[in-house]
Image: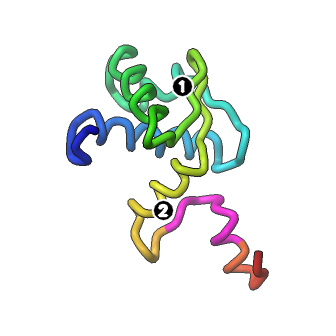
Amino acid sequence: MTNPGSSTDRLARRLVADVAIQARQKPNRWVMLGDIVPKLGVSWLEAEAAAQFAAAKPREWIEHNTHSLMLRQAGRQMLREQAGPDGGVEGDGDRESERSGRLS
């Protein structure tokens, strides 16, 4: 398994964050890798490798299908953990429920 501080891991985490932003955290929303590459500032091959890394077991942060990416629950969880206890991911249904007083 790759070290969490490795450049591959860092790039994969950035890619997952960008997928989340593009998909607006909505389930089953596909994002094109070509829309993410310019934001990452890396080559297509580096972005493709990061997508494969993020989709691989045991992470499974995203679904990777050719040039399309979809955020998975594990990816949302990783972003929440990365944000810390007071952080959250925009559009996170759990946080939305907390703000409105609804319980799931």
Q: Identify residue type, mark 1.
A: Asp
Q: Nearer the viewer, residue 34 or 74?
A: 74
Asked which quadrant contains residue 82, the reply is bottom left
Residue 5 among those drawn in magenta: no
Q: Residues within 10 Å of mark 1 (few under 14, many from 20)?
A: some
Q: Nearer the viewer, residue 24 or 27?
A: 27
Query: Which of the marked residues, 2 or 1, is nearer the chain's N terminus?
Result: 1
Identified at 28% across, 38% down, the residue is 1
Looking at the rendering, the stretch of residues picked out in magenta corresponds to 88-96
Q: Disc 2 versus disc 1: distance between alpha carbons?
A: 23 Å
Q: Which mark is residue 16?
A: none
Quarter containing the C terminus: bottom right
Identified at 72% across, 75% down, the residue is 97
List the residue tagged with mark 1.
35
Tell me: residue 35, above or below residue 100: above
Q: Nearer the viewer, mark 2 or mark 1?
A: 2
Tell me: residue 81, above or below residue 101: above
Tell me: residue 73, above or below residue 43: below
Q: Secondary structure at mark 1?
A: helix
Identified at 50% across, 42% down, the residue is 61
Q: Identify residue type, mark 2.
A: Arg
Q: Is residue 26 left or right of residue 87?
A: right
Report the number of numbered marks.
Answer: 2
List the residue tagged with mark 2.
80
**2 and 1 marks in contact (CB < 8 Å):** no
Q: Residue furthest bottom?
A: 101
Residue 13, percent from left and from top: 38, 43
